[in-house]
Image (tube, coloured by chain):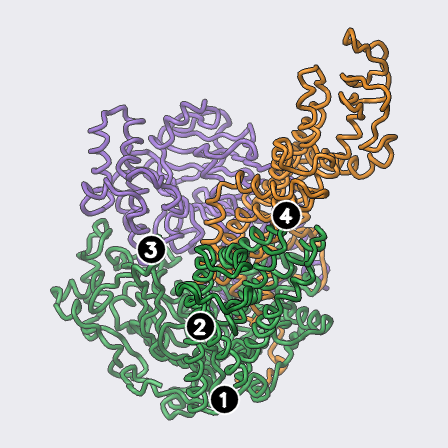
Amino acid sequence: MSATVDHGLAAPKIKGALRQRPPRGILRARAILYGILALVLVTVGLLLVVSVLFRVKGGVDLLVEIWPAYIVAALAYIAPRGYRDRKLWAFGLSLVIGFVLVVGAVVMSYLALVPGAMGGTAAGSAAPGASGAAASGAAASGAAATGAVATAAPAGSAAAASPLASGATGAATTASGTIDGNLAFGLITLALLFLAFGVPLLWGLIRERSFFLAAETRHPIKTAQEIEAETGGFAEITPVSASGSGDTAPALGLPSPVAIATGAVDPLVSVRGLKKHFPILGGILRRRVGTIYAVDGVDFDVYPGEVFSVVGESGCGKTTLGRTLLQLTPPTDGHVVFDGYELADVDPDDMRPLRRRMQIIFQDPFGSLNPRMPVSDIIGEGLLAQGVTNRKERDKRTGDALEVVGLRRDYSRRYPHEFSGGQRQRIGVARALALSPDFIVCDEPVSALDVSIQSQVLNLLLDLKRDFNLTYLFISHNLSVVEYFSDRIAVMYLGKIVEIGTVDELYRNPRHPYTVALLSAIPIADPRRRRSRLVLKGDVPSPAAPPSGCRFHTRCWLRERLGNPEICATEDPALRPMTGDAHHRAACHFAEQISESAVAETVETQDVVETAAAVE
Amino acid sequence: MTEVISADAPRGAPPERDILLDVRNLKTYFKVLDGVVPAVDGVSFSLRRGQTLGIVGESGSGKSVTAMTIMRLLDIPPAQIDPASEVWFDGREILGLPMDQMRRIRGNEMAMIFQEPLTSLNPVFTVGDQIAEQVALHKKVGKKAAWDRAIESLTLVGIPNPERRVKQYPHEMSGGMRQRVMIAMALSCEPKLLIADEPTTALDVTIQAQILELLKTIQQRTDSALVLITHDLGVVAEMVDNVIVMYTGEVVEQGTVEEVLVEPRAPYTMGLLESIPSVEKRGGRLSAIKGVVPSPFNLPPACRFEPRCPYHWERCRTVPPELYLSGPSGRRARCHLHTPEGAGRWPAALEAHRRALATGRELPVHDATPGDA
Amino acid sequence: MTQPLQPPTGPGALHDDLGAAPAPSASDYEVSLQSLSQWELAWRKFRQHKLALIGLGIMTVLILAAIVGPIFLPYAFDDIPRVDQNVYGGRPPFCAVYDNAKHVCTAFGLVHPMGETGGLQRDVLTLVLNGARVSLFLGFTSMAIGVIIGTIVGAIAGYIGGFIDNLLMRIVDVLLSLPLLFVILVVARFFQNSKDNVWAIIMIFGLFGWMGVSRLVRSLFLSIREREFVEAARAVGVRDRRIIFRHILPNALSPIVVVASLIIGGNIIGEAFISFLGFGVNPAVPTWGNILSNALTFILVGNWWWPLFPGVAIILTVLAVNFVGDGLRDAFDPRSRA
């Protein structure tokens, strides 16, 4: 946990750790083992097909002869399973495989490069102990030796070009026991392949060891089952009975400031220093030529029962923030703590019960539903993934979820394209709700909807929040919706939070020039309140090249008014508490200079036509 | 501000000089596999020179198709324009014009600004080329003059360094800048009529503010008429003089912007205004228009808003409502509440509307829909 | 937050916005009346495409004829009906008696509707239908092999990405840079002498015909992987394997089907080509390519009907699959969703 408290938030409480996803090296080694397995299977399969079809003599002998291949295949199958369960034997086994591969490569290079070394060794099993080598080498040499079956070469080249082909050409000459250029070439190729497989495997395994050690030291590790047990399991949702009047308004979900200050209420989600950078790849070699700083250091807490909104323009990173928070994309840096569990690199199996508890509703009601699945499957997928394997049970819960969001039960056999935008969005809500989550990220859930449908979906979300004790992270660019809907708001600009506070504070007393401009830009549907707006200059700069210092300084009206102070371009302002309320923070060096008269004067003097470009 | 929108000028006769655009009983259909979609179903309005008209509606209301029909940009088939429809532009009937004459008007005397600036600009030409080509085509001027005109129009929309920008390709510009280029292109031939189809929907809030203010300023400067198509009542409130509200291809309400947005007369407009979230409604539910827009293949028989309307009664299911006069100065609404038969119900409806606006509470449902028991 | 969810106790205002939710009613204008899956929709649009329907018809007739025809025809394809009479020139279609000296048909009849070949006097119809069996089988099977390999490789490359993607795609690049025609000819040469080498030819076309498919599938996977519904599936905890097979593949299927239909035509032509050159299927086995190849020497004698009918069969088949492919493309095209 970052102990530095410059974000002014307390360190989140940790209940327990989760098993982590194996490091990248291990994953790659696992992929390589699967690759070897596939290679062996394809070779064996083709040999079998060819020998049976063309009644090639010795086909069965061949299958016997390549016995090392079966061992590799078995190892390749067993070892990754062992990793998943963090078994020491799997670790040892893989270590042996990696070691053998590397040694095999060295031996083969020796045989190929040193003249006369070939003399004593038998053909076919040229590299003693190198099981992988023996596998493909023996297979190919056998194939070549039997003549007629040259098909193995093109067939093998389809799956893994060189080892088979070169092995075949090489092995063809080994029968005489002499070494020539072909065999040397074949052996070198194999050796290189083995190195390419073995080195990352070994390297990954060494990393794995450190990972084993690290995982044990921090917090008691909990498994998926333990977490499930702790949260009371996977409860069913029950459709609302049609009764009662709509008069009990949902109360504001935000716990009292006192409760927060004294730590009586723990945040449900804590985000500390969260960063997500995307590489920009370019050139033929797909090298990294730049970085998009989509989310660049964000801290906040979301308390149970509240609606926490994130507002900002497109490209400010609000959508990436939601996805990263849910670990749909791994964060570059920083921590997300959900209900006491840190979500960094969690093993997918252990993540699953937590995934159930944090759901997401997407912006695009057309893109977020699989067009080839009926509604029952779309909603049922989550249930199935969470272990509801009984079809009847799943259908019942799907129907319940549909009813809760106000759709008919019998719609479940229909396909998404038969529904209107608002209905699809309800299906999206039902999908999230069917898993009875605690926390839902609403990623612009109403921006793609028509005005009259927007309010239906907002009402639905509010009702569900009340009925199922939900907590929302509401992402939106629509400030009027956010003002109506949320308890607290964070305003984002170019990957950073520039202002955070409760709705009342933020809308009545904005303390960041960007917030002021955003609020001024809301069009109001009342011609009697027509007014001049504060118009910002230019577009949002590219998140690949954010401005130095305060990221807003290139477009800032306040800075211009104050005579372009140097500090804005050089120093990144901290998100500091404003006077009067410690929970209202803004990241502006001159937050105190903002006043209604300052805004009014700026509006007076601005030239709306000349706002195309920001300060270069 | 007398009768701005005259729906019933005599058929076949040109409108008076002052009216730039006169659309009479416009009907556009689409023939598709499932049947016929009446995308625009009898729309009439007129627009005086230098004025602004807002067309408001949800997706599928036919507002964009109306604009495309006027510009004659629709492919025929699948689109079909009813032969009885008339569009008078600057004293000419343009639906019957041959295509080459229409091409001379389009881009020259009437220009259109599209929603998505990136896809409406050709990526392989510089913006200068694209503007100059249009100018050279319509104004019959030389290359140099056309190029100068391109720079001039970029300056008009406030693009800094127009001499440099004019040589850039669309992808080198930001979204807001591209939309400015689109506007510059539309303005380059000094059109009499500018049609903006959701010009700010694809843009961010702060850029939307820029573009709206720019459109407003430029429209005042050049004195061209503007048709603004949008789903955003806020944009309409700030930009236009007159409004027509469309629903499922029909005009349901028309009047000046003050009349329509402050004192709406059609239940649909009333519902739209009530459903706008605002800070006063915090803590309560929003009043929403129930249900969804009906499928164009399965339209209600009489009033198309009837299944979603909180004020409906038997008459709404049997008699299709017309655009009844509902106030002074040509103000109209498509609702039986403004006929003698419905007049008795109007005060109650108005009362409910006011209450919903103020508190954000549910609309009282007058009588249940059939089958709802 | 951690306690199990209670049944909601709040008022049931949920349905208010939806109008008549629980029971169907006269004022239900919410959804279309008939419920069609995407495939049914595609079929509806496919039916609008006249040429595609014709193509489908031709395909059906050809396949049926290939299956049923040889059973009912009076001759086997390797019959040499009149061993004693070596009538060098054969007989033209619908000709019962042919005067070889004058080159005129003196009596017409239905005996050989497509004529008789020169040389061994075989029935051309019998040959064409038996050839259809082999050629069509070859076209479809090699397509299936190619599409399966291509789909698997492309799916792995596209879904996993990174190192694996790079590796697989470089292999594809290498294979694509080979002059395929020569490779196929050379490889086919190895099998030329084995007695029943249809399978070998099928394997050759399958194993060298998947690269295009894998590239297509990879690009499809790359784009579909980023779609929101895939993200939604991951958000509810669906496993990778299921995401590939249940979420991405069905959505990638329509372009694959289109390409597959075109590959069939390509492979049939390819087989005819290498058989014609003498590298293909064993000359004793009737394929359209072999029939054409055998007819070669007799064209000069005026035996026009011998190459004509298998040639027409090839053209018809390829046209038909291309029409069907075209129709499928239109039917699956989301932009033309009327």
Quote the CA–CA distance across marks 3 and 2.
33 Å
Pair 3/2: label in front: 2
**Which quarter shows the C terminus of chain A?**
bottom left
Quote the CA–CA distance across marks 4 and 1.
52 Å
Colour seen for chain B: purple
Please give the residue where the numbered disc 3 appears in the rendered image.
Answer: A282
Mark 1 belongs to chain: A
Dot 3 and dot 1 within a common chain:
yes
Quote the CA–CA distance across marks 3 and 4.
38 Å
Mark 2 belongs to chain: A
Circle nearer the N terminus (3, 1): 1
Colour seen for chain C: orange
The residue shown at (85%, 30%) is C75
State which quadrant residue A426 falls in.
bottom right
Q: Specify the amino acid type for callout 1.
A: Ile
Please give the residue where the numbered disc 1 appears in the rendered image.
Answer: A221
Quote the CA–CA distance across marks 3 and 1.
41 Å
